[in-house]
Amino acid sequence: MVGVDWSQDALTRASTHLPYTVRGELTALPLRSASADAVLFSEVIEHLVDPDTALAEIRRVLRPGGHLMLSTPNLAAWYNRALLLAGVQPVFSEVSLRAIHGRPGKEVVGHLRLYTPRALREFVVAAGFTVVGLKGAPFHGVPRALRSLDRLACLRPQLASILLLHARKT
């Protein structure tokens, strides 16, 4: 197992749990082609200016038939649908990287891209992967009173807070 990140602070924290960590960018991973059995790409794609290059680089380092496990917030989450109907900016979306405007929350999270289940599937397939499965997961930031509803929404990925995608390199 190898942890790759651009942040030295993140690598220092990860090194207490992983045998190997290396500093790298998603545009040029410091790994040989076809050297990885699996890549965990968790809560990253929504922050990228160029997700196409990132997926191409992940595909390069995966061996044939290798697994991509990807998670990202769902633009079409059940609460975002309600917020849009009320004229409110969806959760996870940013109009500024300096402050919150027009949406619930107190933290600027730096999301540049948001995906619906359909868009995520199509994007990953276009990058040369076969989608094995797509599931939903709850979001830790949902208010306590709504957490059971959030878990129930996970039964339908179209409504879930978080998208969990499993794909294989074709």
Image (spheres, grey):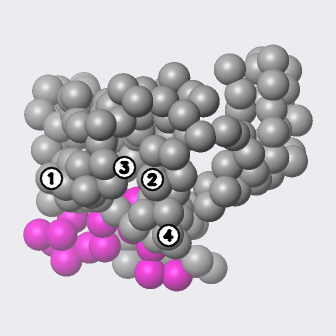
Callout 3: 10 Å neighbours few (<14), some, many (20+)? many
Left or right of 101 in this view: 152 = left
Q: Which residue is mark 1?
A: 118
**Of discs 4 and 1, which sits in the foreground?**
4
Identify the image quadrant of the C terminus.
top left
Identify the image quadrant of residue 70.
top left
Cβ–Cβ below 8 Å for labels 3 and 2? no
For residue 19, above or below residue 116 = above
Kind of element beneath mark 2: helix
Kind of element beneath mark 3: strand
Q: Earlier in the sequence, mark 3 or mark 1?
A: 3
Three-letter amino acid code at disc 1?
Arg
Q: Earlier in the sequence, mark 3 or mark 2?
A: 2
Kind of element beneath mark 1: helix
Q: Is residue 132 at least partly visible in the picture?
A: yes
The image's mark for residue 73 is: 3
Distance Cα–Cα, label 3 vs label 2: 17 Å
Q: Position of residue 28 (x, y in %)?
A: 67, 56
For residue 55, above or below residue 41 = below
The image's mark for residue 55 is: 2
Three-letter amino acid code at disc 3?
Pro
Magenta-highlighted stretch: main secondary structure?
Answer: loop
Q: Earlier in the sequence, mark 3 or mark 4?
A: 4
The image's mark for residue 50 is: 4
Magenta range is 83-96
